[in-house]
Amino acid sequence: MTEHKNHPTSNFLRSIIERDLAQGTYASRRWGGSPGDAAHHAKGLPDPAKIRTRFPPEPNGYLHIGHAKSICLNFGLARDYGGVCHLRFDDTNPEKEEQEYVDGIIDAVRWLGFSWQGCGGDHLYYASNYFDFMYRAAETLIEAGHAYVDEQSAEEIRASRGTLTEPGKNSPWRDRPKEESLRLFREMREGRHPDGAMVLRAKIDMASPNINLRDPVIYRIKHATHHNTGDRWCIYPMYTYAHPIEDALENITHSICTLEFEDQRPFYDWVLERLAESGLLTHPLPKQYEFARLNLTYVVLSKRKLIELVEKGYVNGWDDPRMPTLVGARRRGYTPEGFRLFAERIGVSKADSWIDYAVLEDCMRETLNESALRRIAVLDPIKLVIDNYPAGQSEECHAPNHPLRPELGQRVVPFSRELWIEREDFMETPPKGYFRLFPGNRVRLRYGYVVECTGCEKDANGNVTVVHCTYLPDTKSGTPGADAVKVKGNIHWVSAAHAHPAEVRLYDRLFRVPHPGAGDRDYLDDLNPDSVKIITAQLEPALKESRPEERFQFERHGYFIADRYDSRPGQPVFNRTTTLRDGWQK
Ligand code: ATP
Ligand code: MG
């Protein structure tokens, strides 16, 4: 299959990396074979990875399309510049994390086509393995006069933080002796104080114009069991303190995050500089860079909303094909190649913007158009009887598996007297410009014969039940002179005697407006009431043995995938990935 090898478009991150490589910014780093402090890495060899990036999900939910952007970016940059990207579970918060999510994230990153192996290691890490170092680093900060234990309540700390226009007020505990802070911090760790009794704060500047530098909290007491470290700890580091340390221990060079962390960058640097001064870490230190997160129309990407959709039963789980999760997208039939193409196409910038969902769908169509074999399915069947074709007889027609790739061969499509066609391909009294079946008109049955419509049968309510026609024996596709009879319409069909009935799920967008919940609306009111329709379609025989996750283009209808969970041998169930064209453009 041809990969979409668009030359990677340059962007500000690529420029920074290329400059760093040219200047040898990170050339002196050593790698101790595993994450660790300065002494550990000093014993290692020169780092075989030219750059190190990381993707650091919190294992508290399933990954979504926004995460795919971050994954493609971080793993893609590492791949392109001779580096490696670490998969790091940011599991420093004891309460919300679960193994199910860890497994789901590993699957999703692999499915997208990326690997954390390379440059002499298997770089899958857990931030909770760094708790010992983080604790030691905190004691070092206290000893150097850069941190203190504050006994104010959370409310008092908030109230004394100040505002954008007013400086904060120093805590009454700010200038306590460091020996006292050290003693109390050890007591915190030993479990001698209840949750909320005191915290450890960095001692920076309560008048800083950047509120994030007004003595941020770096450790809190939380008597909670952690999925990895059990009950070993009852104090846990805050994310803004833990994250730069995680990056430094792993020798990360370029730490790429979303824009909302921009104001945290000075604290990121402050933590690392203080620990380098004390000798726990060494230069060159990791640097943080921010990019605009993905905002996509017609979906919601907030974890809280995704959880609500699942828990309140608006969808059938995290992997419902309508969900913007990667498990959902996979089940829907979206392709890893399509996501990589999407990430490349939308690029990265420092300005927030919205991407139209149609851009993502087009990327899927482009990759599917190249890879998906063509098949025939009649989704809304009505019988077509060819009155001059002998009953009980059948013959073979040949249809290419892919119109642009003859090397993929052909398959046999059986033809007989009674066929299924689409209900909409017949009209008793057609409007102007309708070229399909109506009494007296001729169309080509694709890969078969030209037929002339002779009439129809109706039930008591006037609904058409059967369409009749006669065929022109000398017009079979692929035989000499087949084109002598010119027709404007060309319709698909399956032989009724050979067709395989199957469940097909016609998915559409989950929300009917570009910005669900915009303004004062409840986003749940914006759900599309027609986001799924389940039908029984008539499939050509070649589709009967489809394997789970096999993808096809159903001619004239769109792209479909055999559902990975509900398909059985000889009885596939199909999900519609996307129609052939966007039906949402106005
Ligand atoms: P939470 O609200 O729970 O923090 P999150 O979506 O930020 O949720 P994380 O597990 O922290 O989830 O995200 C992992 C990585 O994915 C982070 O580095 C984050 O910057 C990135 N990421 C999350 N959402 C998006 C998005 N919409 N576009 C690009 N990157 C994203
Ligand atoms: Mg986050």
Image (tube, grey):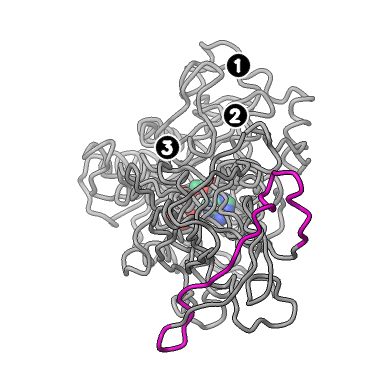
**In the picture, which quadrant includes the C terminus?**
bottom right
Q: Quadrant of residue 190?
A: top left
Q: Position of residue 361 (x, y in %)?
A: 62, 56
Where disc 2 sits, the SS reads strand
Q: Is residue 83 left or right of residue 196?
A: right
In the rendered image, the vertical position of residue 244 relative to residue 215, given as above or below? above
Q: Is residue 533 left or right of residue 346?
A: left
- Residue type beneath disc 3: Ile
* Contact between labelled residues 1 and 2, with CB atoms less than 8 Å apart: no
Res 325 visible: yes
Which numbered marker is on residue 48?
Answer: 1
Q: Position of residue 421 (x, y in %)?
A: 53, 64
Magenta stretch: residue 515 in it?
no
Q: Which residue is mark 2?
A: 52
Question: Viewer-nearest of labels 3 and 1?
Answer: 3
Res 204 visible: no
